[in-house]
Image (cartoon, grey):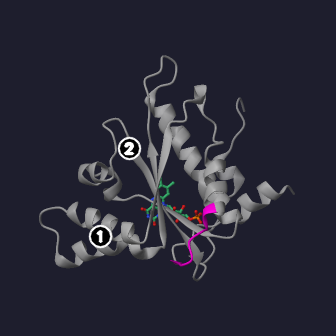
Amino acid sequence: MHSITEALLNRSSEPRLKAPAPPQDVLDLALACAARAPDHALLRPWRYLVIEGEGLERLGELFEASAPAGASDAQRQKLRKAPLRAPMVLVAIASPVSHPKVPEYEQEYACAASAAYLVLALQAEGYGAMWRSGEVSDNDQVCKGLGLGDRESIVGFIYVGTVDSEKPPVPRPEISEFTSRWPQ
Ligand SMILES: Cc1cc2nc3c(=O)[nH]c(=O)nc-3n(C[C@H](O)[C@H](O)[C@H](O)COP(=O)(O)O)c2cc1C
């Protein structure tokens, strides 16, 4: 089996993460892999924010500020603490441009493919990663606070670090459950 297919079969998102975060050379390698995603017309319709340390506290404040008016103290605190679940958060941002042949949704797909490559590369290099979204990823205040432009959107918050403890294995579906031949 090729090392890539083996890494794909064995990868697992890990929610329980601790320091250290990947060093710069591993992060650069993973981001270089992310930039190899399939990409119609080579528009590179993605960008990433790297958030660590004090930045995670600031992200928590942004999350908290996005709480709906009636949110309880416990809900606010949960939002504020959310980014502290890992020593590093990478924000995958779809950054589409106008193109005669490539609609915005295709550019968002490309960004999602890029984020998946990023997660896989980090896991292949021995780090844990977990792609998260939630209401915060679609919140105007959060998007503005992170400096997103009008056409940009958050595709995911990728929590990254060293695996503290592995989660139980995720059941994998049978190939036949999601595949058929056409025409039959
Ligand atoms: C776009 C996207 C958003 C996600 N958002 C969340 C999330 O907010 N919370 C969560 O627990 N899992 C989220 N997940 C799923 C996890 O990243 C992970 O894939 C899932 O727990 C299955 O684990 P596995 O990747 O090991 O199979 C998201 C996945 C994707 C692709």
Q: Position of residue 132 (x, y in %)?
A: 45, 61
Residue position for label 2: 153
Q: Is residue 179 magenta?
A: no
**Residue in view at x 63 percent, y 74 percent:** 169
Q: Quadrant of the N terminus?
A: bottom right
Rounded to the nearest angstrom, the CA distance separating label 2 from label 1 is: 20 Å
Amino acid type of the residue that numbered disc 1 sits on in the rendered structure: Leu
Q: Nearer the viewer, residue 55 or 76?
A: 55
Which residue does the image show at 50% across and 41% down from the upper left?
46
| Residue 66 in the figure: left or right of residue 94 | left
Q: Is residue 183 left or right of residue 137?
A: right
| Figure quadrant of residue 44 | top right
Name the residue at the bottom extreme: 165
Q: Answer above or below: position of 149 versus 140.
A: above
How dense is the environment of label 2, judged by Cα within 10 Å: few (below 14), some, or many (20 and up)? Answer: many
Q: Observer-nearest residue: 22 or 170? A: 22
Q: Quadrant of the C terminus?
A: top right
Crowd band around label 1 with a 10 angstrom C-alpha radius: few (<14), some (14–19), many (20+): many
Residue corresponding to mark 1: 79
Find the magenta span and give its range.
Answer: 17-24
Placement of 172 over or under 111, stated as above or below = below
| Residue at the spot 71% in from the left edge and 63% down from the top edge | 124
Q: Main secondary structure of the magenta part?
A: loop
Residue 182 spot, x, y in % from top left: 70, 32
Q: What residue type is disc 2 on?
A: Ser
25 or 99: nearer the viewer: 25
For label 1, the SS is helix
Quarter location, residue 119: bottom right
